[in-house]
């Protein structure tokens, strides 16, 4: 029996079979959870075959920046399931042009779009869906990155969004705790996703992480999925408000690996 047997997971952010949300969805399914998915309407053709592979009976369109869309998903889940145990927020976006120069050149509109989509959407989701999770020892999981803490060239506005997201996790842990709901962030190392390749110099960043992490390797969406399934399970029942790393240890390094050790 899997560690998520009998639990129901609502997952936001699945885009294709390379996305982190796919790794999380597969891991939760393999551990026994029922899966419900949301998708941007323009991605429907990509998502439906993945939903079928997961045996997901609930697949709903949703723009996380629209309160009416979140409410529509809430109503559908309430009618079909009545409750949820796992809420996954794997959502981030900033206009491509905001990565072309430095943070100094960030536009006001680009900042608003990035922060609303990448950070506020987590707050909005928790506020919308907590009535379906209250008292169930439920778990909320979101995705962050080391660029929230240290300067990663070209990460720009997304670094600011992730820093805000991590602060939000801590405050939401305080708000949701009395409702017996936990929330944690997973800080994954760089992974070859569609979104990642929008960051200038991503291939070099990936190579740098592989060479300089203690384990001298990169991580996969399966690695993230395995951690997420643990955080979604009762085995992590007293872990909340945390940012937990799955990055082959890269975040512990103070300087690059010594040349003679490569």
Image (cartoon, rainbow, N blue to C red):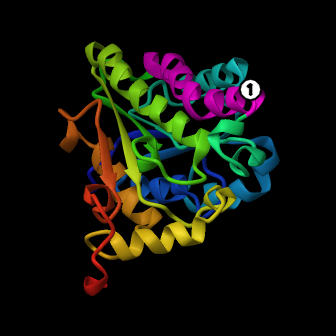
Q: Quadrant of residue 131?
A: top left
101 and 180: which one is in front?
Answer: 101
Where is residue 133 drawn, in percent x and y? Answer: 39, 23
Residue for badge 1: 108
Where is residue 206 drawn, in percent x and y? Answer: 50, 69
Report crowding for label 1: few under 14, some 14 to 19, many 20 or more residues within 10 A (C-alpha): few
Name of the residue lying farthest toward the right: 42
Horizontally, residue 118 falls left or right of residue 255, namely right
Where is residue 201 drawn, in percent x and y? Answer: 62, 65
For the C terminus, which image quadrant?
A: bottom left
Horizontally, residue 158 falls left or right of residue 23, namely right
Q: Is residue 255 magenta?
A: no
For the N terminus, which image quadrant?
A: bottom left
Would you say the magenta stretch is mainly helix, strand or loop?
Answer: helix
26 and 210: which one is in front?
Answer: 210
**What residue is shown at x 66% (from left), y 42% (from top)?**
93
163 and 134: which one is in front?
Answer: 163
Query: Magenta span covers which residues?
Result: 107-131
Q: Quadrant of residue 16?
A: bottom right
132 shown above or below 41: above
**What residue is shown at x 53% (from left), y 35% (from top)?**
160
Of helix, strand and loop, which one carries label 1?
helix
């Amino acid at each position: 029996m899997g560690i998520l047997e009998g639990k129901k997971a609502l997952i936001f952010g699945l885009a294709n079979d390379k996305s982190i949300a796919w790794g999380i969805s597969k891991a939760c399914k393999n551990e026994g959870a029922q899966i419900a998915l949301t998708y941007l309407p323009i991605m429907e053709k990509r998502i439906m075959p993945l939903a079928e592979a997961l045996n997901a009976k609930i697949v709903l369109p949703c723009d996380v920046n629209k309160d009416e869309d979140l409410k529509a998903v809430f109503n559908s889940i309430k009618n079909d399931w009545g409750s949820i145990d796992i809420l996954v927020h794997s959502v981030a976006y900033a206009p491509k042009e905001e990565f072309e120069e430095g943070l100094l050149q960030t536009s006001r509109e680009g900042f608003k779009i990035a922060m609303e989509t990448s950070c506020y959407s987590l707050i909005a989701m928790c506020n919308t869906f907590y009535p379906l999770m209250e008292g169930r020892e439920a778990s909320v999981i979101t995705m962050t990155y080391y660029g929230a803490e240290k300067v990663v060239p070209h990460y720009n506005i997304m670094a600011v969004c992730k820093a805000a997201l991590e602060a939000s996790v801590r405050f939401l842990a305080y708000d949701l705790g009395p409702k017996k709901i936990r929330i944690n962030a997973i800080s994954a190392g760089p992974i070859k996703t569609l979104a990642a390749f929008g960051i200038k110099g991503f291939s070099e960043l990936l190579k740098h992480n592989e060479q300089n992490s203690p384990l001298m390797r990169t991580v996969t969406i399966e690695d993230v999925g395995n951690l997420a399934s643990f955080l979604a399970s009762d085995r992590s029942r007293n872990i909340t408000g945390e940012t937990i790393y799955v990055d082959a240890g890269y975040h512990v390094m103070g300087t690059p690996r010594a040349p003679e050790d490569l």
